[in-house]
Image: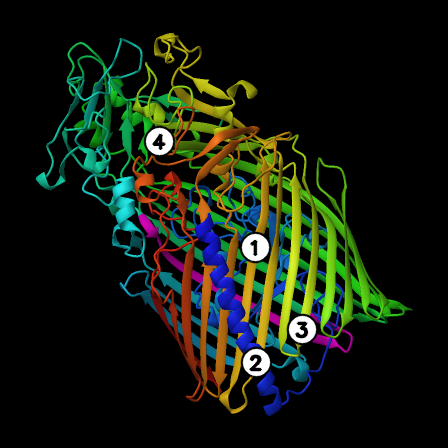
C-alpha cells in the first residue's frame, strides 16, 4: 500500500500549494477592491427544522450550488454525486445490468450502503423503488435516476447521523435535492457529448419556465422538463479500460469466449444414475464442430485453458460473449416537474409539487444454455426450486455413447437474450405554511409511487425443454419448438403516502439570544408489491428467479428540536424522535450538538447521536427472493478454489447454484451511535477551512445470510446447505478417506438475519478560497477530501472487528461481505471568472485497494497472501483464480485513479450560454480489477468509469 500513500501525499502537497498561492493572491486583491458585506437572513438547512442565521451549525453540511453542478460536467445526478468524496462504495451506478439493482442509481454515504442514506426531494422523502435487493446495505433503494439534473437548484449533503430529525434510513446521513422554485422566464438547454473515440454518446434537452414573482405578485409557478438519451457501448469497443490485462488474465476479448454454442458438447456419465460426468480430455467427451470456420478455436494455454481441461487441444465452436458484454447499456429518460407557490394572505401561503419521471434501460444478453453437468433450477413461487438436469438417456438421437447417459451442453443461439427495465415514478406534494404569533408552521401531504417493469428475453420453458428427455426429441427439434421461450414480464410497485405537520418558534432569552424550538409529527404508509410473471411463478421457467412481496405498514413519528444559545459564542442543539413501526416497540433516538465560536475566525463543533433503521418491507413481509449464484467455489469439493478433490471435477471450483432468501418476522431494527468533532477556521475573510472527524457504529445490521459465510462455516448453519445425498458422488480427501455429506452443491437456504456490526471513522477536510483579482476577475478554489481512518466489520456477533480500510473488505477479512474501501478520496477544483468568461478545472483522486487476504473472522493467517493468482500457501482456500495475475500485477491491488477535468463557459452573446467540458482530460484508463464481479467489464464501476477523455457541449438560451 506504500505506493498509494506516496500518491496521496503528492496530491495533498499539490492542493496545499494551490491554496497557499490563493491566499497570497487574495491578500493582494483585498487591497484592490473591497467586497460589501452580505445581508444575513435566517435560513433552514438540511439536518434541522429550526431556522438560523449562520449556515455552519453543529453538524457538517456540504452544499453543491447551481454553479458547482454546472461546472461538474455531470450529465446525471449519479455522475454528480460521484464527485463527492464522502460517498463511498455500496451504491449502484446504473451503467450496466446491475442484477438486483438493475436500472437504478443509488447513493451510499460513508460506504454504509444505500439503505443507510436517506434521500429527500425538497425536504420530503422519496419512495424507495420497487426492488428486493438482498445484498448487504441494499434493501432500500432510492432511485436518483428519477431526479433530473437540469431542475436542481442545489444539493445539501448532511454528513452526520440524522435519525433524530428524519427517522429511519438516515444513519449515515441525508442528501436533500432542492429543485428550482420562484423562477421567472423561459430557458432552454441542450447538451451533447461523447468521448474521444466517439463512444459513450449522450444527448439531453431541457426547458424551464416560470410565471409570477412570489415577492411582487404573490404567486409563482415553475415548470421544468428534461429528456435524455445515451448509447450502448460494448466492452470490446471501449478503449479506456485495461483491455490487454483483461484479455490475458480473464480470457476475455480474445478469440475464445465460450465453448457453449449451438454445436453441443456431450459428457459420458461416470456410473449409471450418479449424475456425475467425465471431464478429462479424452473419448469420454465428444463435441460437434458444424459451424462457420471463423468460429473454430483450438483450446490451449493462450486462452488460460488448463491442460487437464476437456477443451485443451480440442477444436470447438466459439460463442462470442463479448458481443453482449456492456460497459454502458442504452437508456432513455423523461422527467417533468412543476412547483407552485401562492400567497393566501400576509401570514399564510400554499404550495404544491407535481413530478413524473420515466427511465428506460435496455441491456443486451447472450442466448441461454443448458448444461447437464450440474442441475439447473426452475423456481415456483415458493420453495427451493425444482432441479432440472439435461442428461440424455441411452438411445437418445443425440447421445454419442451407446451404453451410457450423457450430459449435454448446448446454447439456443436463435433465441436472443437481454432485458428491458422501465421505472416510472409519480409524485405529488401539497401543503400550507405560515405564521401565527411567534410560530412558523408548515403542514403537507405527500404521495409518491414508483413502478418497475422488467421484460426478460430468451429464458427457456421447462415443459418444452423436458421434451429432450421425456420424448427423446433431438436438440435441433427442441430448438424449433414455438413455445420454447416467451417474453417474461415482472412488475414491482412501491408507494408511500404521508401527512405531516411541523412548527418552530423562539422564546426566552439566554445570554446568547432566544431559544429556538421546532417540533412535528408525521404519519406515513408504505407499500411494496413485487409480482413475477405467471410462467415464472408457476415454476415453468428455467434459470429465472422469482421475487414475490406483498406488504404494507403504517408508521407514526414525532420529533422535537431545541437550540440553546447559552452564551454569545456557545450554543447547543438537542433533538429527539419517536417512531412506531408495526411489530416493533416504540423507538426513541436522541441527538445533541454543540458549537463554540472562539472568535470571528475560529469555531469548534461536535455532535453525538443515536440512530435506528427499521427492517425494509421486503425483509419482514410475506414473500421471498430467489437467486442464482455463479462462479461459486465449493470449499469441500474444491478446497483451494483451483484443484478438485478425487470424485469432484472442475465444475465444483466454479459452480452455479440456486438460493432462496426468506423473510424473517423476528428481525430487530438496526441501531447506531455516531460522534463528530469539527473545526471551522477562517484565517481571512475569503479563506475557509473545515475539518470534521466522524465515527459511526452500526449494530444488528439486517442482511441475507452470506452464502460464503454459510459454505465456509456449514456446521454453524445446519439445514442451510442442500447437497446431492448419493454416497457415490461423495469426494475423498488427500488421504483417500471419503468425506461425509460431500455431494455436489444443489442449493442454499438463506434467511434475513441481524448480523454483527460496522464501525467507520475518518476525517473530512474542506478548504475554500475566494480571490477577488480586481480587473483580472475572480478565482475560486476548493479542496474536498475524505480520509477513512477505520472501517471495521464483524459479520456476526462475537467476530473480531478488523480494520478493512484500503482493501476490498470481503477479501481482507474473508468472513465479511464488504466492498472496496479506499483510504482517500479527494477533489481539488478551481474556477476563474472574468466578465463573460469562466474557466474551471478539477483534479479527482480515488485511492487504490489491496486484494490481499489477511483474516477470516477470528483466524489470522500466518502469512498474508493474494486472493488472485498462484503461489499461495497450501492451506489457502476459496481463491479467486486468474492464474497469471501476480505476474502482471505483483502488488496485488487495484490501482489508485487520478483524473483531470476542464471546462469553459462563455456568456458574451445576448441571452446565450455556451459551455464546453472535458472530463478526464489526461485520458486515464479505469484501473484493472480481476474480480469475477467485473468479468464483463474488467473494472469496478462503483469507483471508476470507462469513459476516458470525454467531451460535452452545452448551449443554453434565455427568452426575455
Q: How many numbered badges does the structure rendering display?
A: 4
Q: Give the side of residue 448 with respect to residue 546, left or right.
A: right
Badge 3, how many Cα within 10 Å: few under 14, some, many 20+?
some
Q: Are marks 2 and 4 in contact (CB under 8 Å)?
A: no
Residue 682 is marked as 3
Q: CA distance from mark 2 to mark 3?
A: 15 Å
Tell which of 956 and 864 is nearer to you.
864
Q: Is residue 492 above or below residue 145?
A: above
Find the magenta span and give its range: 326-350
* Front one among 105 and 418: 105
Q: Earlier in the sequence, mark 2 or mark 3?
A: 2
Based on the displayed image, in which of its 4 quarters is residue 604 positioned? bottom right
Q: Is residue 375 magenta?
A: no
Q: Confirm or deny contact between disc 3 and disc 4 (CB under 8 A).
A: no
Which mark is first along the chain, 1 or 2? Answer: 2
Q: Going 37% across and 13% down the picture, which residue do you hit?
A: 734
Q: Residue at x 52, y 55 (%)?
A: 824
Q: Earlier in the sequence, mark 3 or mark 1?
A: 3
Number of residues whose C-alpha sits closer than 10 Å to that of mark 2, classed few (under 14), some (14–19) or many (20 or more): few
Q: CA distance from mark 2 to mark 1?
A: 27 Å
Give the Cα distance between marks 4 and 1: 33 Å
Whichever of labels 2 and 4 marks the residue nearer the N terminus, that label is 2
Give residue 24's position: percent from left, percent from top.
Answer: 57, 80
Which residue matches tag 1?
A: 787
Mark 2 — residue? 24
Question: In the visual, does 555 lie left or right of 195?
Answer: right
Q: Tell me, for residue 871, which label it has, or none.
A: 4
| Principal secondary structure, stretch drawn in magenta | strand
Residue lying at 37% horizontally and 56% vertically, measured from the top left: 331
Q: Secondary structure at mark 2?
A: helix
Amino acid at each position: 500500500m506504500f505506493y498509494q500513500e506516496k500518491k496521496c501525499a503528492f496530491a495533498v502537497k499539490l492542493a496545499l500549494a494551490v491554496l497557499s498561492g490563493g491566499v497570497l493572491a487574495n491578500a493582494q486583491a483585498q487591497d484592490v477592491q473591497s467586497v460589501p458585506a452580505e445581508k444575513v437572513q435566517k435560513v433552514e438547512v438540511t439536518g434541522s427544522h429550526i431556522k438560523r442565521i449562520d449556515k455552519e451549525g453543529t453538524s457538517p453540511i456540504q452544499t453543491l450550488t447551481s454553479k458547482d453542478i454546472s461546472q461538474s460536467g455531470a450529465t446525471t445526478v449519479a455522475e454528480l454525486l460521484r464527485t463527492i468524496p464522502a460517498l463511498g462504495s455500496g451504491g449502484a451506478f446504473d451503467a450496466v445490468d446491475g442484477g438486483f439493482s438493475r436500472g437504478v442509481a443509488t447513493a451510499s454515504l460513508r460506504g454504509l450502503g444505500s439503505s443507510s442514506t436517506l434521500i429527500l426531494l425538497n425536504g420530503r422523502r422519496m419512495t424507495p423503488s420497487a426492488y428486493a435487493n438482498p445484498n448487504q446495505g441494499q434493501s432500500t433503494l432510492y432511485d436518483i435516476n428519477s431526479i433530473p439534473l437540469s431542475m436542481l437548484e442545489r444539493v445539501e449533503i448532511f454528513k452526520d447521523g440524522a435519525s433524530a430529525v428524519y427517522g429511519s434510513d438516515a444513519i449515515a446521513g441525508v442528501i436533500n435535492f432542492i429543485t428550482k422554485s420562484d423562477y421567472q422566464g423561459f430557458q432552454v438547454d441542450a447538451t451533447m457529448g461523447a468521448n474521444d473515440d466517439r463512444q459513450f454518446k449522450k444527448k439531453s434537452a431541457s426547458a424551464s419556465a416560470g410565471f409570477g414573482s412570489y415577492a411582487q405578485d404573490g404567486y409563482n409557478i415553475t415548470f421544468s422538463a428534461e429528456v435524455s438519451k445515451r448509447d450502448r457501448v460494448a466492452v470490446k469497443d471501449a478503449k479506456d479500460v485495461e483491455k490487454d490485462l483483461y484479455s490475458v488474465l480473464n480470457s476475455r476479448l480474445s478469440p475464445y469466449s465460450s465453448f457453449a454454442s449451438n454445436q453441443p458438447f456431450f459428457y459420458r456419465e461416470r456410473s449409471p444414475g450418479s449424475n456425475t460426468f467425465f471431464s478429462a480430455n479424452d473419448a469420454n467427451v465428444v463435441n460437434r464442430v458444424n459451424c462457420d470456420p471463423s468460429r473454430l478455436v483450438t483450446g490451449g494455454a493462450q486462452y488460460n485453458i488448463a491442460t487437464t481441461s476437456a477443451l485443451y487441444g480440442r477444436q470447438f465452436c466459439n460463442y462470442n460473449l463479448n458481443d453482449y458484454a456492456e460497459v454502458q447499456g442504452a437508456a432513455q429518460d423523461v422527467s417533468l416537474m412543476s412547483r407552485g407557490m401562492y400567497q393566501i394572505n400576509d401570514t399564510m401561503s400554499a404550495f404544491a409539487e407535481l413530478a413524473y419521471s420515466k427511465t428506460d434501460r435496455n441491456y443486451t444478453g447472450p442466448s441461454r444454455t443448458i448444461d447437464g453437468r450440474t442441475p439447473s433450477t426452475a423456481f415456483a413461487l415458493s420453495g427451493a426450486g425444482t432441479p432440472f438436469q439435461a442428461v440424455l438417456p441411452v438411445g437418445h438421437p443425440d447421445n454419442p455413447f451407446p451404453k451410457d447417459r450423457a450430459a449435454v451442453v448446448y446454447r439456443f443461439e436463435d433465441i436472443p437474450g437481454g432485458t428491458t427495465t422501465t421505472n416510472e415514478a409519480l409524485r405529488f406534494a401539497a401543503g400550507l405554511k405560515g405564521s401565527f404569533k411567534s410560530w412558523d408552521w408548515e403542514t403537507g401531504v405527500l404521495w409518491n409511487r414508483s413502478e418497475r417493469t422488467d421484460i426478460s428475453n430468451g429464458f427457456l420453458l421447462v415443459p418444452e425443454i423436458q421434451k429432450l428427455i421425456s420424448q427423446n426429441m433431438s436438440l435441433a427439434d427442441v430448438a424449433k419448438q414455438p413455445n420454447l421461450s416467451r417474453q417474461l414480464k415482472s412488475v414491482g410497485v412501491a408507494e408511500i403516502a404521508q401527512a405531516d405537520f411541523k412548527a418552530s418558534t423562539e422564546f426566552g432569552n439566554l445570554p446568547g439570544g432566544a431559544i429556538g424550538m421546532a417540533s412535528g409529527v408525521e404519519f406515513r404508509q408504505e407499500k411494496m408489491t413485487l409480482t413475477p410473471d405467471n410462467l415464472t411463478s408457476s415454476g415453468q421457467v428455467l434459470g429465472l428467479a422469482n421475487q414475490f412481496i406483498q406488504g404494507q405498514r403504517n408508521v407514526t413519528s414525532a420529533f422535537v428540536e431545541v437550540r440553546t444559545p447559552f452564551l454569545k459564542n456557545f450554543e447547543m442543539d438537542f433533538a429527539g424522535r419517536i417512531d412506531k413501526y408495526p411489530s416493533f416497540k416504540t423507538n426513541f433516538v436522541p441527538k445533541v450538538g454543540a458549537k463554540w465560536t472562539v472568535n470571528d475566525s475560529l469555531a469548534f463543533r461536535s455532535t453525538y447521536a443515536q440512530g435506528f433503521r427499521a427492517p425494509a418491507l421486503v425483509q419482514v413481509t410475506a414473500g421471498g427472493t430467489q437467486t442464482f449464484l455463479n462462479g461459486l467455489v465449493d470449499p469441500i469439493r474444491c478446497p483451494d478454489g483451483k484443484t478438485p478433490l478425487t470424485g469432484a471435477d472442475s465444475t465444483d471450483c466454479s459452480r452455479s447454484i440456486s438460493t432462496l432468501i426468506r423473510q424473517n418476522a423476528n428481525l430487530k431494527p438496526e441501531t447506531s451511535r455516531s460522534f463528530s468533532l469539527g473545526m471551522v477556521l477562517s484565517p481571512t475573510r475569503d479563506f475557509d477551512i473545515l475539518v470534521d472527524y466522524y465515527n459511526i457504529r452500526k449494530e444488528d445490521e439486517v442482511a441475507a445470510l452470506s452464502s460464503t459465510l454459510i459454505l465456509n462455516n456449514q456446521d454453524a448453519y445446519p439445514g442451510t446447505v442442500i447437497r446431492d445425498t448419493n454416497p457415490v458422488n461423495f469426494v475423498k480427501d488427500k488421504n483417500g478417506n471419503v468425506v461425509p455429506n460431500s455431494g455436489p452443491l444443489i442449493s442454499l437456504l438463506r434467511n434475513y438475519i441481524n448480523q454483527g456490526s460496522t464501525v467507520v471513522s475518518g476525517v473530512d477536510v474542506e478548504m475554500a478560497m475566494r480571490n477577488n483579482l480586481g480587473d483580472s476577475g475572480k478565482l475560486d478554489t476548493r479542496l474536498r477530501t475524505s480520509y477513512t481512518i477505520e472501517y471495521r466489520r464483524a459479520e456476526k456477533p462475537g467476530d473480531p472487528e478488523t480494520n478493512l480500510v484500503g482493501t476490498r473488505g470481503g477479501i481482507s477479512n474473508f468472513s465479511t461481505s464488504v466492498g472496496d474501501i479506499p483510504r482517500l478520496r479527494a477533489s481539488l477544483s478551481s474556477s476563474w471568472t472574468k466578465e463573460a468568461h469562466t474557466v474551471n478545472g478539477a483534479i479527482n483522486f480515488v485511492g487504490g485497494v489491496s486484494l490481499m487476504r489477511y483474516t477470516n473472522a477470528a483466524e489470522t493467517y500466518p502469512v498474508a497472501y493474494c486472493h488472485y493468482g498462484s503461489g499461495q500457501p497450501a492451506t489457502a482456500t476459496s481463491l479467486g483464480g486468474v492464474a497469471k495475475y501476480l505476474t502482471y500485477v505483483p502488488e496485488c491491488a487495484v490501482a489508485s485513479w487520478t483524473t483531470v477535468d476542464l471546462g469553459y463557459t462563455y456568456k458574451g452573446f445576448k441571452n446565450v450560454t455556451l459551455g464546453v467540458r472535458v472530463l478526464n482530460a489526461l485520458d486515464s484508463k479505469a484501473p484493472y480489477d480481476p474480480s469475477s464481479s467485473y468479468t464483463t467489464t474488467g473494472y469496478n464501476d462503483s469507483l471508476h468509469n470507462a469513459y476516458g477523455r470525454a467531451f460535452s457541449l452545452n448551449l443554453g438560451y434565455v427568452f426575455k
